[in-house]
Image (cartoon, rainbow, N blue to C red):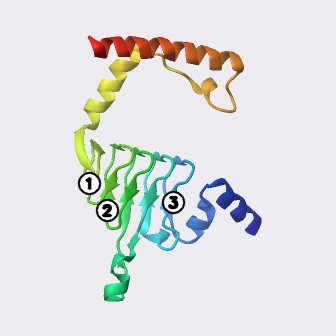
């Protein structure tokens, strides 16, 4: 058991089983990337719904020790993350926050207040940029004119031929997108 914990620390990955044992609750399809931190000292105050992705270096905190020295106590608050949520790389979620359903949070955001369902949010502090439906429709249309790659292009599955193919397809797309932006 201790060896698995050490391996997880070295790899920069979460020990989800340990967090679950300590009260962390999550639904189906929790996807945590490298360097994610789910407040280990207060993980029982954090809940995630179904289909949640935490991109690299996301920090979810249920405590804030900024008041410990001056007041003798630490601020503590529950964090609830709904269903179908993507939280971008380097984002910090502060204690006491509820993130609704069908939400995308952009990279490097600071989530310091509740995010209502059906939105795309980003920034410091995190603010709504557009509706989730607008975001999905925009990207659905973009996918019609851009290359789309299936699971055979994922690390561990991808062949050298597919790597070369992907690079070529994305070079053409970049040039096309660059030309469109310039005109």
Cβ atoms under marks 2 and 3 closer than 8 Å: no
Which is nearer the eye, 14 or 178?
178
Residue 97 spot, x, y in % from top left: 31, 62
Which is nearer the eye, 122 or 99?
122
Task: Residue at 36% x, 43% y: name it.
Answer: 106
Q: What residue sits right under mark 1 in the picture?
A: 125
Q: Quadrant of the C terminus?
A: top left
Q: Which marked residue is nearer to the observer: mark 2 or mark 1?
A: 1
Residue 1 showing in the rendered view:
no
- Residue 118 is left or right of residue 86, and the answer is left
- Residue 31 is left or right of residue 12, and the answer is left
Residue lying farthest to the front in this orientation:
182
Q: What residue sits right under mark 3 in the picture?
A: 37
Q: Which marked residue is nearer to the observer: mark 2 or mark 3?
A: 3
Q: What residue sits right under mark 2 in the picture?
A: 97
- Residue 154 is left or right of residue 55, and the answer is right
Q: Disc 1 on helix, strand or loop?
A: loop
Q: Disc 2 on helix, strand or loop?
A: loop
Which is nearer the eye, 126 or 1?
126
Disc 1 from disc 3: Cα separation: 20 Å
Residue 178 spot, x, y in % from top left: 36, 16
Residue 169 spot, x, y in % from top left: 52, 13
Disc 2 from disc 3: Cα separation: 16 Å
Residue 119, quarter of the rendered image: top left
Residue 12 spot, x, y in % from top left: 62, 55
Disc 2 from disc 1: Cα separation: 13 Å
Residue 135, quarter of the rendered image: top left
Residue lying farthest to the bottom in this orientation:
72
Which is nearer the eye, 27 or 177?
177
Task: Residue at 42% x, 45% y: name it.
Answer: 88
């Amino acid at each position: 058991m201790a060896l698995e914990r050490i391996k997880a620390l070295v790899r920069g990955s979460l020990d989800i089983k340990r967090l679950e044992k300590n009260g962390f609750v999550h639904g189906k399809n929790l996807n945590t990337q490298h360097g994610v931190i789910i407040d280990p000292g207060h993980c029982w105050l954090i809940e995630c719904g179904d289909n949640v992705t935490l991109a690299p270096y996301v920090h979810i905190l249920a405590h804030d020790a900024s008041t410990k020295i001056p007041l003798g106590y630490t601020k503590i608050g529950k964090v609830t993350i709904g269903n179908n949520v993507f939280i971008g790389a380097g984002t910090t979620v502060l204690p006491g926050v509820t993130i609704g359903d069908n939400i995308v949070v952009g990279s490097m955001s600071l989530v310091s207040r509740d995010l209502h369902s059906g939105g795309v949010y980003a920034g410091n502090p995190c603010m709504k940029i557009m509706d989730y439906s607008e975001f999905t429709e925009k990207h659905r249309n973009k996918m019609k004119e851009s290359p789309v790659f299936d699971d055979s292009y994922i690390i561990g599955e991808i062949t050298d031929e597919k790597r070369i193919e992907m690079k070529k397809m994305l070079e053409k797309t970049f040039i096309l997108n660059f030309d469109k932006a310039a005109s």
